């Protein structure tokens, strides 16, 4: 059997709001409720399961590989909403995108403060090495 990544749980202040935000920004199907989770499915069959947290949330990073056309659409939705974005995970290059591996990428925050990333090329695929 080959090993495949199936899902991850993302702790949130408001799982419905966070799941809806991700689905809207990435233009995915609306989240579906499954038990205590709000589930967002990606095209490669990996689910992002949002769950409410009662305690403090440790902020995480989640990256999504998208096409050039999808990047343009996501970028437009971020700008339409007036959301901050950065070219780097350290958030030092606000209002910029990166061009790693001859692609494009950017970072932005979800409603719970998790750092989300969209990129058009997998890191290292074009020879970029930080």
Image: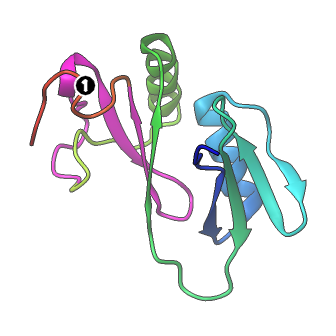
Point 80% across, 63% down: residue: 37
Please state the horizontal and vertical placement of residue 129, each as a whole percent of the image: 10, 37
Residue 99 visible (yes or no): no
Please state the horizontal and vertical placement of residue 20, each as a whole percent of the image: 72, 46
Q: Could you classify mark 1 by the number of other residues whose Cα lies within 10 Å: few (under 14), some (14-19), or many (20 or more)?
A: few
Magenta span of residues: 91-119
Point 72% across, 68% down: residue: 51
Q: Which image quadrant for residue 53?
A: bottom right
In the rendered structure, does residue 12 fall within the stretch colored magenta? no
Instruction: Identify whether 97 is placed above or below 110.
Output: above
Please state the horizontal and vertical placement of residue 11, each as a whole percent of the image: 62, 70
Pick out the residue farthest to the front: 1
Pick out the residue farthest to the bottom: 55
Instruction: Identify whether 29 is placed above or below 102.
Output: below
Quadrant into which the N terminus falls: top right
Is 41 left or right of 81, judged from the image as shown?
right
Instruction: Identify whether 81 is placed above or below 9.
Output: above
Q: Mark 1 points at which residue?
A: 125
Point 47% across, 63% down: residue: 113
In the rendered structure, does residue 108 fall within the stretch colored magenta? yes
Residue 54 visible (yes or no): yes
Point 21% across, 32% down: residue: 124
Task: Determine the secondary structure under disc 1.
Answer: loop
Please state the horizontal and vertical placement of residue 107, each as a whole percent of the image: 35, 43
- Colour scheme of this structure image? rainbow
């Amino acid at each position: 059997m080959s090993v495949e990544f199936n899902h991850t749980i993302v702790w949130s202040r408001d799982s419905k709001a966070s799941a809806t935000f991700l689905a809207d920004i990435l233009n995915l199907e609306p989240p579906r409720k499954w038990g205590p989770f709000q589930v967002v499915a990606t095209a490669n069959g990996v689910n992002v399961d949002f769950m409410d947290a009662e305690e403090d949330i440790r902020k995480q990073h989640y990256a999504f590989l998208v096409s050039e056309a999808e990047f343009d659409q996501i970028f437009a939705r971020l700008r339409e909403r007036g959301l901050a974005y950065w070219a780097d995970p350290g958030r030092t290059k606000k209002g910029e995108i990166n061009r790693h591996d001859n692609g494009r990428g950017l970072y932005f925050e979800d409603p719970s403060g998790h750092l989300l990333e969209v990129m058009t090329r997998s890191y290292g695929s074009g020879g970029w090495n930080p």
